[in-house]
Image (cartoon, rainbow, N blue to C red):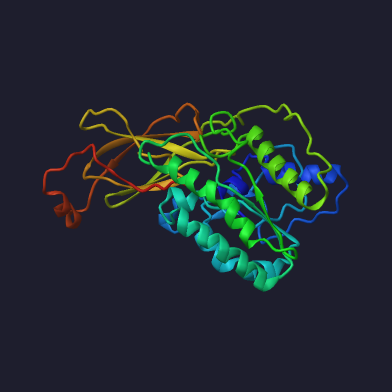
Amino acid sequence: MGDSISHGLEGDYTWRYRLARHFAACGAPVRFAGPWTGTCALPDLAPEEGAAEVRAGGYRPGIVFPGDRHHARWGGLMDEARGGVADAVAAHRPDHLMVALGFNDLAWGVSGPERLLANVGEFVRRAREARPDLRFLVADVVRRTPLPHLPHLPGIVETYNARLPGVLAALSTPGSPVVPVGLAAVYDPYTDTYDGLHPNSVGEFKIAKAFADAYSRAFHGGGPAFATPVPAVAEPLPIRPPGEIAVALHGSTARVSWSRVFGASGYWLDLRDVDAGTGFERSPLPIAACGCDLRLPGDGTYEVRVSAARGDQETAPTRAVRFACRVPAATSALFREPVDRRQYDWVASQV
């Protein structure tokens, strides 16, 4: 059970795949359980526009991952998982629950360290309601590269991680052990991620090794050891620019859409006001979908272009598409007041 770090993005190997390979190499009769398969693929439109979340994205081309079931969701929270874990355990009957949750709770301000620790306790207790002999492996929260708008996040993560082992020890029982998994100590956000947080192929391998080693120490006397060194793989996953852009006008709203790029984590959209003679203005964040709605400030001629991104990797932009916005007379009164034509209402979201 986890968030984006366990779910994976389209084109990832995922640490789940690396762990499955380890168990297979050891001849262990392991079955992964859960309601979902695959990785996260971006929807056609930003979630605010009512698009359904797409979960069943593909893995790195060329790999085969049969039985890849899981209960990890991009954006997942411990605050949410504690309420549904009993039903999930009852439905899928796991013997072991591997848990990597908590980063989003802390980073998004949903919970501070104290509340998150309390939620971990509730999570364990509710899971045991469905299976009293369930075994747990619970990871701490990984570090990420600094974010200027979240200067206190590293300290919050450190506080939570320092207290977690004691909480897990108090929750553990002989019949239902709760085993800590130390990710923060082995996971380097500068070298093991493609965007400062989400694992690249090296990070995936390190997370899988941490879970495998904790599992072996707790339940199999320390062996067999997880394979080392980290296998050499091509990084990063190459992505191509999107295809042609389509623009559909609805009054002062322009719906912009483009073709899906396999492995993209988002798309930068550049817009410029041709009549005003301004340069291209970039969306504040990569758009986490293959389209979005732009609410324009009024009549005018505009140009739009899109580039695909995967973390810090960015493709060349598409050819700019020009379109004219003519607001109906009944609507034009909305724009009688002077407006700064450089300010657009971007409908976008962060995955």
Q: In the rendered image, is residue 289 in sight? A: no
Q: Up-down: is 119 above or below 222?
A: below
Residue furthest out toward the left: 337
Residue drawn at point x = 59 percent, y = 43 percent: 9
Relative side of 140 to 325, left or right: right
Which quadrant would the N terminus be assigned to in this image? bottom right
Q: In the rendered image, is residue 127 in sight? A: yes
Q: Position of residue 216 (x, y in %)?
A: 78, 47
Residue drawn at point x = 46 percent, y = 50 percent: 106
Q: Nearer the viewer, residue 346 or 297?
A: 346
Q: Position of residue 64 (x, y in %)?
A: 77, 43
Q: Position of residue 158 (x, y in %)?
A: 49, 43
Residue furthest out toward the bottom: 129
Q: Nearer the viewer, residue 273 or 9?
A: 9
Q: Position of residue 22 (x, y in %)?
A: 79, 42
Q: Up-down: is 183 above or below 251?
A: above
Residue drawn at point x = 67 percent, y = 37 percent: 206
